[in-house]
Amino acid sequence: MKYMDAEKFIDFTKSLGFSEKIELAPGLFSQSGNLPNLDSLKDPKLMANLSFGQGKLMATPIQVSALINAIASKGKLVKPKLIEGLVGENLEYIKRNFQRPAKRAFSRYTADFLKEAMKMSADIGTGILGKPEACEVAVKTGTAQSGIKVGEHYAQQAWYAGFFPENEPKYSVVVFAEDAESGSKSCGPAFKRIIEEIYNNQLEN
């Protein structure tokens, strides 16, 4: 981070949807989260904090999901949405094309590198507690300081995010827990159960 340009770093982070409201359905928006201002990043310690998700960064599960989707999609970013289409009184589609255009967020090489790192996290790293037995996944765990005091301690926010199948991704899952122990211990088992349910339902169908 010592040699990275702070302005370029902030612009890249914004291009991934951080600090931006995402319209999930007509008139329904997610929270925007927060990024530190450019002036504060003149301090190299704050710049380093931002690089691994600490400091004044605040992200929503929707934003993290968008980032995970971009890695799974070989570097192409498509903002998440809630609706597939609109139907009439006979339950027939009257409008279905809500697909948002994909944009290149980072290179395919970078996406492949991150995917391999996330696969290792599930296989032998911090994500091992959330790895399903029957299928391969790529995951990232996180345990973030919140600055929010709960009783006599400061709450930690736990994350476990990933996608599957690892080789041809179709599903991404983000599990978030407030005032938790760690991403792996607090969120990994829930991720594992969700993926196993999806996998088993596919086998039945």
Image: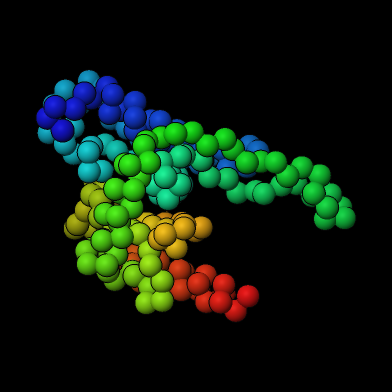
Q: In percent of the image, x 46 and y 69: which residue is there?
A: 194
The colour style of the image is: rainbow
Can see residue 183? no
Q: In percent of the image, x 56 and y 77: which residue is there?
A: 203
In the picture, the quarter occupied by the N terminus is top left
Q: Nearer the viewer, residue 101 or 151?
A: 101
Residue 75 spot, x, y in % from top left: 41, 41
Instruction: Determine the residue located farthest toward the right in the rendered image.
Output: 90
Q: Nearer the viewer, residue 201 or 75?
A: 75
Q: In percent of the image, x 46 and y 39: which residue is there?
A: 77
Is residue 158 found left or right of 203 in the rendered image? left
Does residue 201 lie above or below 65 as drawn? below
Q: Nearer the viewer, residue 127 or 61?
A: 127
Residue 80 spot, x, y in % from top left: 53, 45
Q: In percent of the image, x 40 and y 30: which residue is there?
A: 15
For residue 134, which quarter of the picture? Answer: bottom left
Residue 162 spot, x, y in % from top left: 38, 57
Is residue 10 found left or right of 65 in the rendered image? left
Is residue 181 found left or right of 29 in the rendered image? left
In the picture, the quarter occupied by the C terminus is bottom right
For residue 63, which quarter of the picture? Answer: top left
Can see residue 84? yes
